Amino acid sequence: MRLNGEIYDGEDREEGEQKLVVGYALTLKKRKSFLQPNFERLARNKGISFVAIDQNRPLSDQGPFDIILHKLLGKEWCEIIEEMGKFDLELKRSHSSSNSTNDCQMDYRQTQPQVIVLDPPDAIQHLYNRQSMLQNVVDLNLSDFHGKVGVPRQMVITEDPLSIPDEVTKAGLKLPLVAKPLVVDGSTKSHELFLVYDQFSLSELEPPLVLQEFVNHGGVLFKIYIVGDAIKVVRRHSLPNVSKCELAKVAGIIPFPRVSSASASADDADLDPGVAELPPQPLLERLAKELRHRLARPSVVQYRHDPRAWDKRCLLCY
Ligand SMILES: Nc1ncnc2c1ncn2[C@@H]1O[C@H](COP(=O)(O)OP(=O)(O)OP(=O)(O)O)[C@@H](O)[C@H]1O
Ligand SMILES: O=P(O)(O)O[C@H]1[C@H](OP(=O)(O)O)[C@@H](OP(=O)(O)O)[C@@H](O)[C@@H](O)[C@@H]1OP(=O)(O)O
């Protein structure tokens, strides 16, 4: 990694020796979950500091930053970042078309050192639709590669809630079902999910939504994060299995927001080896490669997989 002309070697630094400044633009919620004191301390020890970007002031008056890390959805913010990207591109063009590029490069570096934006807007593909994001997994056809990869049986309901019971019967989906808003736009509401235990209650749901068969998976799931070639798997607690007996006794709709959030980490939990075993690396690598290919241009794949039921040699993504 480039740091004012030096290469970052990943070694710990003496306290106070700053090598990398990361400007961040994140929601308050994300700041709380991401910039934990332990993380900031670890980063500081490695010479990396995090500085909040003030969105009310021009970016050029702030910093200098080596990296800009952002996860904001607003159009205004995207334009600011895009403008930065254009400036950088123009600069590169003027370098390649002129012989006296060094002057230009020097001016630019002096006023605004080269910043790595994670990620530039044109390298981000937002996956808003729960159905289409899973279609990429269906299309992979990884049916016999160190195990299977698939998605739970599901259907999309866009209109009349009163028709849902019939539509579910026609589609042959088995109860209990997980009801999820069709669109995941980062809002709290888009992560409000319901477990539906009986046919009649289905008409109380609010379309547009995805209805998925609930798959028992031992109360543990894996989240797979892919950045370039790096793959990180974490274990999270999840919903417990639903037995036939429970299904016969329980009725209605039960809400369950964010059951597998970062605070539900099961990395250090004492688990049954049957559910704790991680999916094999070759399968993860293949999955990452195929998804990167299918999701086309982005250099960093921002995709969410919650594969489970690995104890049955079946990686389900939802
Ligand atoms: N088909 C399913 N079968 C069993 N459990 C499921 C199923 N779908 C989702 N879950 C449970 O619901 C949780 C949330 O599901 P999902 O990841 O689809 O929603 P989300 O709102 O995108 O969640 P997150 O907050 O993790 O981003 C999962 O972590 C898992 O515990
Ligand atoms: O805070 P953010 O808005 O980035 O929320 C993201 C959340 O991160 P958090 O853990 O920091 O809350 C993620 O959880 P983990 O990776 O930890 O499982 C995951 O649920 C994403 O789907 C959320 O993105 P969204 O779908 O809402 O855009």
Image: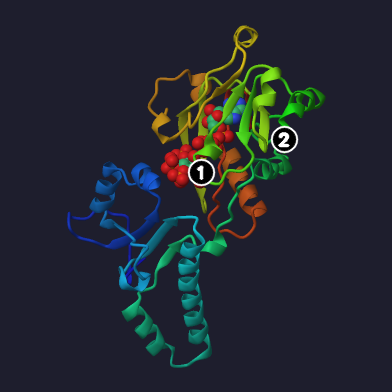
Residue closest to the eye, 107 or 30: 30
Quarter holding the C terminus is top right
Does residue 232 appear in this view? Answer: no
Q: Residues within 10 Å of mark 2 (few under 14, many from 20)?
A: many
User: What is the residue that sits farthest to the right in this orientation?
Assistant: 170
Q: Is mark 2 within 8 Å of ligand 1?
A: no
Evaluate if marks 1 and 2 touch, with contact meaning CB atoms under 8 Å apart. Answer: no
Three-letter code for the amino acid on which mark 2 is drawn: Ile
Residue 306 position (above or below residue 214): below
Three-letter code for the amino acid on which mark 1 is drawn: Ser
Does residue 286 appear in this view? Answer: yes
Q: Position of residue 21 (x, y in %)?
A: 30, 62
* First in sequence: mark 1 vs mark 2: 2
Q: Which mark is residue 187?
A: 1
Residue closest to the eye, 216 or 273: 216
Q: Position of residue 257 (x, y in %)?
A: 50, 30
Which residue: 50% across, 86% down?
94
Q: Report how far apart the C-alphas of labels 1 and 2 lie in the structure.
A: 20 Å
Quarter holding the N terminus is bottom left
User: What is the residue that sits farthest to the bottom in this orientation?
Assistant: 99
Q: Position of residue 157 (x, y in %)?
A: 72, 35
Q: Is mark 1 within 8 Å of ligand 2?
A: yes
Left or right for 259, reference 288 = left
Q: Residues within 10 Å of mark 1 (few under 14, many from 20)?
A: few
Quadrant assignment, res 184: top right
Quadrant assignment, res 113: bottom left
Which residue: 63% across, 11% down?
247
Q: Which residue is mark 2?
A: 157
Residue closest to the eye, 21 or 248: 248
Which residue: 67% across, 16% down?
198
Helix, strand or loop at disc 1? loop
